[in-house]
């Protein structure tokens, strides 16, 4: 009802006699999800992804912010307008340059072994780290020698987030390796066996074709 009428400022049911309902007696249905109104379809029951903030939460590590943004981009699609908005916001945030590079590189498609090896011979790149297929821990350096461990054939350049995931995988106990970590399991194994396992782990993490 328009202001100025005797019942101004109240909702009306539109019936004869102008019967009205007090404003606080009506609870409109909420048709929005995270502030977006959907037309012609019921609200989704799936929890929508959290829109990444412009900065890290208090006490949050950089990798935690990176993982949240990666999760968001997987839902909306890395080529979507929503993803463009995220990247633009990250470009404008001076303190997030490293995180921006890590988020972008995490969306790389799997590449051939030759491509990953060739990239590792280039100057360092934001968002990427060099990874040794046969691990560079002390036992292997003694067993195979520094030259072979650091050779171009054994070195690949991969997204930094994938590198962190792979390093964590090597360190955790795994039933596939009789309850030992992959790193412990591979100690003392031959070069060929360690190479086979290293390539398998790269494929498992979506780095290698």
Image: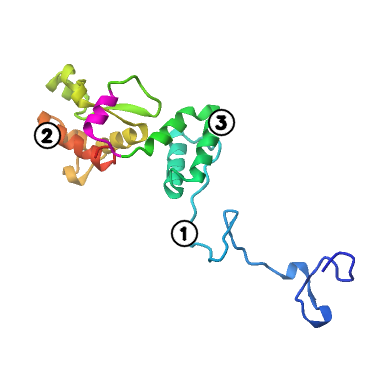
Q: Where is mark 2, residue-wise?
A: 193
Which of the 4 image quarters holds residue 160?
top left
- Precedes in sequence: disc 2 or disc 1: 1
Q: Residue at x 63, y 67 (%)?
A: 29
How much space separates mark 1 and mark 3, taking CA atoms? 31 Å
- Quadrant of the snapshot with the C terminus: top left
Question: In the drawing, does residue 26 fall left or right of residue 163?
Answer: right
Q: Is 81 on the left or on the right of 181, as rendered?
A: right
Q: Residues within 10 Å of mark 2 (few under 14, many from 20)?
A: few
Mark 3 surroundings within 10 Å by alpha-carbon count, few (fewer than 14), some (14 through 19), many (20 or more): few
Name the N-terminal-most of marks 2 and 3: 3
SS for tag 2? helix
Mark 1 lies on a secondary structure that is: loop
Which residues fall within the magenta stretch?
Answer: 110-120
Mark 1 or mark 3: name the one nearer the start of the chain.
Answer: 1
Residue that protrudes farthest toward the bottom in the picture? 16
Question: Relative to 39, is 191 on the left or the right?
Answer: left
Residue 121: x, y in percent?
27, 21
User: Could you tell me how far apart the alpha carbons at marks 2 and 3 are, in whole angstroms?
Assistant: 46 Å
**Residue 54 or 168: which is nearer the viewer?**
54
Say which element carries label 3: helix
Residue 118 image-quadrant placement: top left
| Residue matched to label 1 | 46
Q: Is residue 138 shown left or right of residue 84? A: left
Q: At 26% across and 30% down in the image, what residue appears? A: 115
**Residue on which disc 3 sits:** 92
Above or below, 25 against 162 in this view is: below
Q: Residue at x 35, y 37 (%)?
A: 108
- Label 1 neighbour load within 10 Å: few <14, some 14-19, many 20+: few
């Amino acid at each position: 009802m328009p202001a100025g009428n005797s019942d101004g400022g109240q909702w009306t049911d539109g019936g004869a006699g102008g019967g009205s309902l007090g404003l606080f007696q009506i609870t409109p249905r909420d048709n929005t999800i995270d502030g977006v109104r959907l037309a012609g379809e019921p609200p989704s029951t799936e929890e929508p992804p959290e829109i990444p903030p412009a900065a890290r939460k208090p006490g949050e590590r950089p990798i935690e912010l990176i993982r949240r943004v990666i999760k968001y981009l997987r839902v909306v699609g890395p080529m979507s307008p929503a993803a463009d908005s995220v990247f633009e916001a990250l470009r404008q945030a001076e303190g997030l340059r490293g995180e921006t590079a890590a988020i972008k590189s995490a969306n790389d498609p799997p590449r051939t072994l030759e491509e990953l090896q060739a990239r590792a011979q280039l100057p360092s790149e934001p968002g990427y780290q060099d990874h040794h297929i046969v691990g560079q821990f002390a036992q292997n350096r003694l067993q195979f020698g520094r030259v072979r461990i650091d050779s171009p054939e054994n070195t690949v350049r991969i997204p930094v987030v994938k590198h962190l995931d792979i390093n964590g995988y090597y360190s955790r106990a795994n039933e596939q390796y009789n309850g030992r970590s992959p790193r412990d399991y591979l100690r003392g194994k031959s070069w060929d066996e360690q190479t086979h396992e290293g390539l398998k782990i790269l494929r498992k993490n979506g780095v290698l074709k």
